Amino acid sequence: MRPYILPIIYFFIILLLQNTVINLISINYIVPDLILILLVFYTIKNNQIYGMVLGFIFGFLFDIITGSLLGSSVISKTIAGFTAGYFSNENKRETYLNSYAFPLIVLLCGIIDSFVHAFFSSSNLNSDYMLNMLQQGIFPGMYTAAISVIVLLFRPKRSIR
Amino acid sequence: MFRFFSNIWDNYKEYFILVFLLIVGLILLSFNQKPGVKTARAVAFGTFASLSSMVTDVISVAQIKSDNTRLREKNAELMLQMNKLREFGIINEELKGLLKLKDTIKYPLIPAKIVSKSFSTSQNTITLLGGNSIGIKPGMPVINDQGLLGLIYSTSDDFSIARTLRNRDLKLTVKDERSRIDGIMKWNGEDLVMVDVPKTFDIKPGDRIITSELSSLISIPVPIGIVMELRKVDIGIFNEVRIKPFVNFSGADNAFVIGIVESKQKNQLELNFFNRK
């Protein structure tokens, strides 16, 4: 449980920002998902199983605190953690975290996360809806990836433990 | 045998754990309406909202300047509008007196500050500073000066969560103010739409949409938005009406909760899922 304590503390700080400050930079109600950036960062830093469990915890806390459908973020963040886990190769870890590969990984995970979240929090399915979900996956994912570039630029040289 | 299972576990443990966590997630989806979950949610967001309100206070100070300019403009507009309404009011009273009508309806407004917003494409919610202690209950409508923001979904002692119109789980009975045609309005993930509107119904772009008295949730007329376009006009027997909401959800900082309690008879209706006491 110990390795999870620090990310969870960061989670609460970031959720606070996500629900207050980040709304100020929303574009047509699309906001970057800072929690996903944190999740991808810690998953690459550790491993796939860690990422999945952390995604599960983040999703559960997010659903409970924000009042969204309980379980929707749990599933989407777990899958996002699983996806990010494929990039937690020990040999390439530092490369992924310190290069522009990081925003691309965030983009991939962001699209998957938004897509899965939209799928589970929906009530009806039709062709337009599938198109909507694709749009809802791609735009938030792109915005999150763009913000993760800033995170990359301001990341301290000494890695966070 | 043990080695066999051990090998399988070593090779595929990530997938086993993923499946396990997803199953737990799916089980959680079915727990949404359980009273225990609602209580846990009320405690969690109540605690977190206290922190959010502190951060929001700091942000609010920075926003006060731009808000002031906007409010001054609004004030001037309202002053002109009030003058007009005063005139209308005098005529109205006169006419009502003639018809021996008595206007007894008063809507109690509970002011509440928005302390946090959760913007997601499908589950848009806002947290309000104010809960059970000041009389806010689940199912009460939330408005601001522009129109309907949403509906209270969950409350704790000092905070409450409201589902905004941009939430897929909020469906309302609305009507066209001009033609008095009713319909069901929902958020489809991209737009606010009135669905399954027969093509023969008289709804035109530019019409104002308000809540309908048929609604078991909000039966008083509250402005919602304006009709932008009719969709699916070439196919099927139903149109889809796209509505542009009056309210700017991202810019809303303050709100009012309408403290209306529907009649007991109405509350006992099966379709009214917010069974108030």
Image (tube, rainbow, N blue to C red):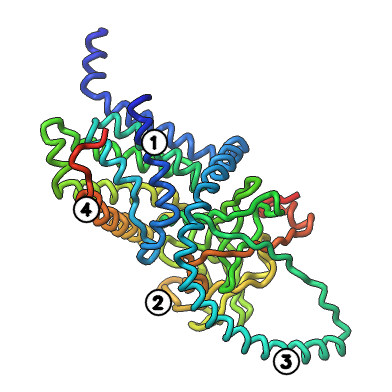
The picture quadrant where one finds residue B80 is bottom right
In the displayed structure, B251 sits above or below B74; it is: above
Q: Nearer the viewer, mark 1 or mark 2?
A: 1
Q: Chain of mark 3?
A: B
Circle 4 residue: A149
Question: Picture coordinates of residue B163 (x, y %)?
Answer: 54, 56
**Horizontal and vertical percent position of residue A65:** 50, 44
The reply to whether residue B237 is visible in this rendering is no
Q: Earlier in the sequence, mark 3 or mark 2?
A: 3
Cβ–Cβ under 8 Å for marks 1 and 4: no
Local secondary structure at mark 3: helix
Tag 1: amino acid: Ile
| Callout 1–callout 2 Cβ contact below 8 Å | no
Residue at 49%, 69% (x, y): give it.
B64
- Residue A123 vs residue A91, the one in the foreground: A91
Query: Mark 1 vs mark 4: which is more N-terminal?
Result: 1
Does the CB distance between marks 4 and 2 fall below 8 Å? no
Look at mark 3 in the image and give the residue it sits on. Answer: B87
Q: How far is disc 4 from disc 2 in space, using C-alphas?
A: 45 Å
Q: Are marks 3 and 2 on the same chain?
A: yes
The amino acid type of the residue labelled 2 equals Asp
Which-is-in-front pick, marks 4 and 3?
4
Q: CA distance from mark 3 to mark 2?
A: 46 Å
Q: CA distance from mark 4 to mark 3?
A: 58 Å
Q: Which residue is mark 1?
A: A8
State the CA–CA distance, disc 3 to disc 1: 59 Å
At 68% across and 62% down in the image, what residue appears?
B110
The residue tagged 2 is: B234
Answer above or below: position of B10 versus A135.
Answer: above
Whether callout 1 and callout 2 share a subunit is answered no
